[in-house]
Amino acid sequence: MKDYQPVDLPAFCNVGADVMGKDRQPPMGRQSFHGLPFLTGAPGARRPRKTFIAMKAAEDGVAIPIGRKARRIIFAHLLLESGLPDDGKLGKVLAEYVFRLSDGSEERVPVCERYEISSSLGFSRWIASNFKYTETPFLGVTSNRWVPQPRYEVRWDQAGYRQTEVMRDGPTWY
């Protein structure tokens, strides 16, 4: 897809895949999420030591030069720890993407919990066990594929789901 090019990020990566947990093995290498290309880890490497860019609240951030004209920038990101079980506040600003344009101006885009980003880890398990739904971001799309519902048969307890045509899973990876 020539209109979308993944940005090569290995020089900026500061943590390995183990940041997601010992038993979780995220997809690596060239990926396609909903038809858009992404590159996770170094090309050709099976399990590079440093695969992701992790940010902590006290850090200033990381500057990643794009070096070419971009009409849209799409991120594959994940919230590792959710504060929702503790404070219950939806839409809390967790981060900010700052785009510095070639004319010197800046565009700031807030990243809010449950709007642009959500967690695939502990909170989703808590939600699933207590409320029977997953934590899908309202304004974001997960890396999971949408699964069509069976066309001619469905379990009685899932009859209402058939009207939705597809089921979206909560975020498994990004």
Image (cartoon, grey):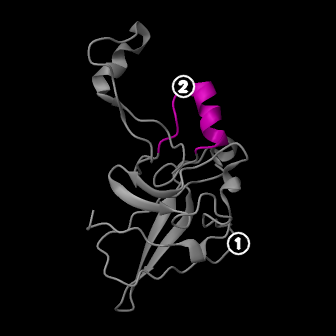
Q: In this view, does 16 lie to the left or right of 27?
A: right
Q: Earlier in the sequence, mark 2 or mark 1?
A: 1
Q: What stretch is highlighted in magenta?
A: 120-136
User: Which image quarter is the N terminus in?
Assistant: bottom left
Front residue of 29 and 174? 29
Query: Looking at the image, which residue is at 39% across and 7% down?
Result: 156
Q: Where is residue 166 in the image (x, y as percent from the top left)?
A: 33, 30
Q: In this view, does 11 lie to the left or right of 111?
A: right
Q: Where is residue 100 in the image (x, y as percent from the top left)?
A: 43, 84
Disc 1: which residue: 58
Front residue of 38 and 83? 38
Which quadrant of the structure image shows residue 167? top left
Q: Is residue 1 above or below residue 13?
A: above
Asked whether residue 127 is drawn in magenta, I would say yes
Disc 2: which residue: 132
- The 10 Å Cα crowd at callout 1, few under 14, some 14 to 19, many 20 or more, is few
* Local SS, label 1: loop
Asked whether residue 115 is drawn in magenta, I would say no
Q: In this view, does 120 lie to the left or right of 122?
A: left
Q: Is residue 164 above or below residue 96?
A: above
Q: Which amino acid does label 2 sit on?
A: Lys
Q: Where is residue 89 in the image (x, y as percent from the top left)?
A: 58, 48
Which residue of the protein is positioned furthest toward the front in this rendering? 44
Which quadrant of the structure image shows residue 109? bottom left
Query: Looking at the image, which residue is at 48% across and 65% down?
Result: 110
Q: Position of residue 70 (x, y in %)?
A: 32, 76
Which quadrant of the structure image shows residue 59? bottom right
Query: Looking at the image, which residue is at 67% across and 41% down?
Result: 122
